[in-house]
Amino acid sequence: MKKWVIYTLASAMLLGLPLVSQADPEGDRKAFQDYFKNRFPNTPFEDFINGVYAIDPESREQWEAIEEFPPYEIAIEEGEQLFNKKFANGKSVGSCFPNGGNGIADQYPFFDTKRGEVVTLAVAVNECLTANGEKPMKYKKGPLASVLAYMAFTTRGKKVDEKIPKDPRALEAYESGKQFFYARRGQLNMSCAHCHVDNSGNKIRADLLSPALGHVTHFPVYRSKWGELGTLHRRFGGCNEQVRAKAFEAQGPEYRNLEYFMTYMSNGLTWNGPGSRK
Amino acid sequence: MWKSVKRLSTVAGAAMLISGSILALPHVVFADDVEDGKKVAEDRKKGNCFGCHDYVGAEMAGNIGPKLENMKARYPDKGALRDRIWDETKFNPNTIMPPFGKYKILSEDEIDKIVEFIYSL
């Protein structure tokens, strides 16, 4: 094992927050949101769904021009076709969800008390495929990202309302996501919070750092750097690699719990995916 | 001469690793070290200091950390400056600045050169 991996583990353990006993997600959420309201007094709460464009009037103008002919439009169409495509057994993706799968992305992620784990929309779509004898899709980009884009699109305007059911395992999932968010990682020894809380609004070289509040609302995202659509977990992986940490597996337990925590922190905002970013 | 200076700094580096602090050794400075230091400081895969710090001559610097300036006046003891680069978490446990020495992001020699470079600012 490399030296710095050991250091990272050691510092993550030092940071280790007490599990469950003192958990107070509602208190966390309020403190989290108040922090950003104070840090960016000119940004209306609702606007935090727009990432760095919520805090930077200059790049916002360009972005608004791009959004008039959104680069993710083709992906939404492709996603709609895949969403409606008949499986060999005659069913389709919508058959696995309430309301035919329309406008239901806001129900995800959720803590499934029967399974004892966080279930994301990406996982639910793939499980729908395998349950119907179809092949699952890759989690970071491509066809699944397009299906998620379409499902996010039909959900636009709904409120983020993440819940933590009365089940100690749900609190544990929340706490492990929270720890992930605040733990130093990688040879560069940085946490998500270092960049997207403490230094949100500051520049790392030429890049303005976005506030973590609202991070989850607009995924999947068409990123000009990627030249295509990518999922939230693709982004998590990219940000882990920036600090020379190994990315975790997309839709593995670590990133699912992280998504759960980050979604809870964004409660009260509006779902607005898919989005476009630099 | 060159060799022995190198040797000296390697020994100092080893001593520092063991004791965890810097011995303020007299250091011979070469103009080359300042140049080399700038290169290592601005290499994205090495120091990438301008990712976070502005300084005179930095292009498109970030603004996460304080401007690097007046280093000589602010750090009469060069070793104290080196300590900050080696492991800033010792001075501020919550800092975002990577512990360049402690986590071996830079070699001891590269850190020496960066010290020479920013000492010239």
Image (cartoon, coloured by chain):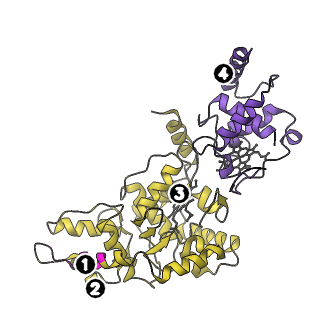
Residue at (50% x, 55% y) in the render: A239
Q: State yes or no: discs 3 and 4 in contact (Cβ < 8 Å).
A: no
Please tell me how crowded label 4 is: few (under 14), some (14-19), or many (20+) other residues with Cα within 10 Å.
few
Tell me how far mark 2 sits from mark 3, CA to CA: 34 Å
Stretch of the chain drawn in magenta: A78-87
| Kind of residue sitting beneath label 1 | Gln
Tell which tag, 3 or 4, sits nearer the viewer: 4
Q: Earlier in the sequence, mark 1 or mark 2?
A: 1
Gap in angstroms between the C-alphas marked 1 and 2: 18 Å
Give whichever of B7, A111 is nearer the camera: B7
Residue A181's disc is 3
> Would you name the residue on which mark 4 appears?
B14
- Residue B117 versus residue A122: which sits nearer the camera? B117
Q: Which residue is mark 1?
A: A81
The chain letter corresponding to purple is: B
Instruction: Give the residue pinned by disc 2.
Output: A99
Which chain is indicated by disc 3? A
Residue A9: x %, y % from top left: 51, 41
Q: Considering only vertical position in the picture, is A109 above or below B106? A: below
Q: Secondary structure at mark 2?
A: helix
Marks 3 and 1 on same chain: yes
Q: Identify which amino acid the numbered label 3 is placed on.
A: Phe
Q: Mark 1 and mark 4, same subunit?
A: no
Residue B91 screen position, x and y as percent: 74, 42
- Amino acid type of disc 2? Asn
Q: Chain of mark 4?
A: B
C-beta proximity under 8 Å, tags 1 and 4: no
Disc 3/disc 4 C-alpha distance (Å): 35 Å
